């Protein structure tokens, strides 16, 4: 052990990197109350130890659990009658070779935190409990088969947040993570616990080897382009898996078309083949997982974000444009499509709106005209799931 644990007055919250099940036993020696998933409380021996430490339990199946846990962390951090709180802000285990994105729960109270770095000094195998590694029983067996197992615990000085960090928990979390990463001499990544869940689904895509670029979907980066949550992304990954019958990790046109087939499907109003080629960014005749998820997430986005809305509008335009090489959408074709989506408006009203959008009178609706029409007539939603579900 290097350094010393901060007193209750110096730091109410202790945070550490999470590699294996082993460091959780050391928490018992620290006498701090852990933040742990609910399932851990039912594990023989380990569950008894956890319960004795007055834990804060997270029920990942309960949508209100995170909010309640966050409030409990704040309450305990402010109340010195409680034990210190210890948690792993990454929210999951890793190999210890990098620090992934920190959740903000430990930093929301704005109280000083003490970083604790765990190192496993074993050249025989990696102690990390990851989805690609051995199961918990297999990992425990490996540990028991070693002559000795070395773990070192490094208590860093308590980190006192600035006024800016107190008002911005994300900044506070990022800065503390940087301090820990520099001490551990490891890089940081913007992956999160949600990304781990999504990656587990992505690993099911193929038995064949996938390139890191094709299979690594980082939700934070994805959200910069389109509004999507973990569950929405997982559904798209599952759809990819269902269509990827040969487990190649890529979809060809025939497989992609199966997305729009089924007992209750109808002939699409727009060209599915053209949509496929729009999503095929590298123009190789197949879609990898990232192209599929990003393209369909953008197509189904109902986000109010300006950047996302613009990107979704462009994709809608190019899908409706088809491959006719006219530089836009035929006015009559667009009227037919919108009449299909909005039959309650009537064909005459829709045709009038489209005709008014054709500023230069060439019978073709350009991207600028298409965007202007959408802005002038917000009742015509030209993007999002509600729009495309009526066309495919």
Image (tube, helix red, strand yellow):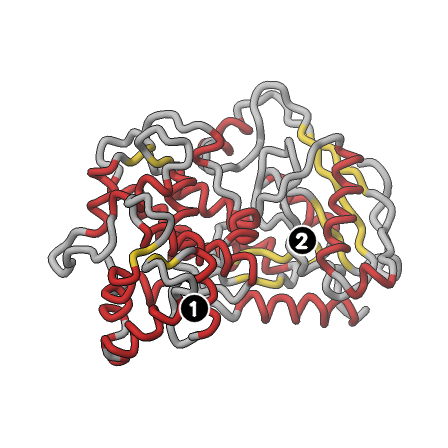
At x 59% / y 33%, what residue is drawn? 95
Q: Is residue 214 above or below residue 14?
A: above
The residue nearer to you, when weighing 257 against 281, is 281
Residue 385 position, x and y percent, is 35, 63
Residue 365 position, x and y percent, is 37, 59
Say whether residue 137 is visible: no
Q: Is residue 57 above or below residue 195?
A: below
Q: Are marks 1 and 2 in contact (CB under 8 Å)?
A: no
Residue on which the image places disc 2: 87
At x 76% / y 62%, what residue is drawn? 168
Residue on which the image places disc 1: 373
Taking 230 as reference, is 204 left or right? left
Residue 322 position, x and y percent, is 29, 48
Taking 355 as reference, is 124 left or right? right
Which numbered disc covers residue 242?
none
Taking 150 as reference, is 370 left or right? left
Q: How many marks?
A: 2
Quadrant of the image containing the C terminus: bottom left
At x 43% / y 54%, what residue is drawn? 298
**Alpha-carbon neighbours of circle 1 within 10 Å: few (<14), some, or many (≥20)?**
some
Q: Quadrant of residue 97?
A: top right
The residue nearer to you, when weighing 10 against 54, is 10
The residue nearer to you, when weighing 109 against 37, is 109
In the rendered image, the residue lying farthest to the front is 361
Task: Of the two numbered discs 1 and 2 on the same chain, state the one appearing first in sequence.
Answer: 2
The Cα atoms of the two marked residues, 1 and 2, are separated by 51 Å
Q: Is residue 64 above or below residue 238?
A: below
Q: Secondary structure at mark 2?
A: strand
Taking 167 as reference, is 241 left or right? left
Quadrant of the image containing the N terminus: top right
At x 52% / y 44%, what residue is drawn? 218
Q: Secondary structure at mark 1?
A: helix
């Amino acid at each position: 052990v290097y350094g010393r644990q901060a007193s209750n007055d110096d730091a109410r919250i202790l945070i550490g990197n999470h590699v294996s099940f082993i460091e959780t036993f050391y928490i018992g020696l620290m006498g701090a109350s852990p933040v742990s998933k609910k399932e851990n409380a039912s594990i023989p021996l380990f569950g008894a130890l956890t319960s004795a430490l007055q834990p804060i339990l997270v029920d990942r199946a309960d949508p209100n659990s995170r909010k309640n846990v966050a409030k409990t962390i704040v309450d305990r951090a402010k109340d010195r009658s409680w034990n210190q709180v210890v948690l792993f802000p990454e929210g999951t285990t890793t190999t210890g070779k990098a620090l992934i994105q920190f959740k903000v729960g430990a930093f929301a109270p704005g109280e000083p935190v003490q970083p604790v770095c765990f190192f496993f000094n074993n050249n025989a195998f990696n102690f990390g409990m990851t989805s690609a590694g051995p199961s918990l029983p297999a990992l425990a067996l490996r540990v028991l088969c070693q002559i000795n197992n070395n773990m070192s615990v490094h208590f860093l000085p308590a980190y006192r947040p600035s006024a800016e960090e107190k008002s911005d928990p994300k900044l506070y979390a990022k800065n503390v993570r940087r301090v820990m990463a520099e001490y551990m001499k490891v890089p940081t990544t913007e992956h999160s616990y949600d990304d781990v869940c999504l990656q587990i689904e992505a690993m099911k895509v193929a038995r064949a080897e996938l390139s890191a670029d094709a299979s690594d979907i980082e939700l934070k980066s994805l959200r910069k382009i389109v509004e999507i949550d973990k569950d929405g992304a997982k559904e798209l990954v599952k759809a990819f898996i269902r269509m990827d019958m040969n487990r190649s990790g890529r979809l060809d046109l025939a497989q992609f078309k199966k997305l729009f087939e089924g007992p209750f499907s109808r002939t699409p109003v727009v060209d599915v083949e053209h949509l496929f080629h729009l999503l095929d960014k590298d123009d190789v005749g197949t879609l990898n997982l990232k192209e599929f998820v990003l393209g369909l997430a953008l197509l189904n986005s109902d986000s109010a974000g300006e950047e996302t809305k613009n990107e979704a509008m462009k994709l809608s335009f190019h899908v409706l444009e088809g491959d006719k090489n006219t530089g836009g959408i035929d006015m009559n074709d667009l009227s037919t499509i919108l009449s299909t989506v909005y039959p309650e408006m009537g064909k005459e009203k829709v045709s009038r709106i489209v005709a008014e959008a054709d500023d230069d009178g060439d019978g073709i609706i350009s991207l600028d005209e298409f965007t202007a029409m959408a802005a002038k007539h917000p009742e015509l939603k030209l993007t999002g799931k509600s729009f495309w579900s009526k066309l495919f």
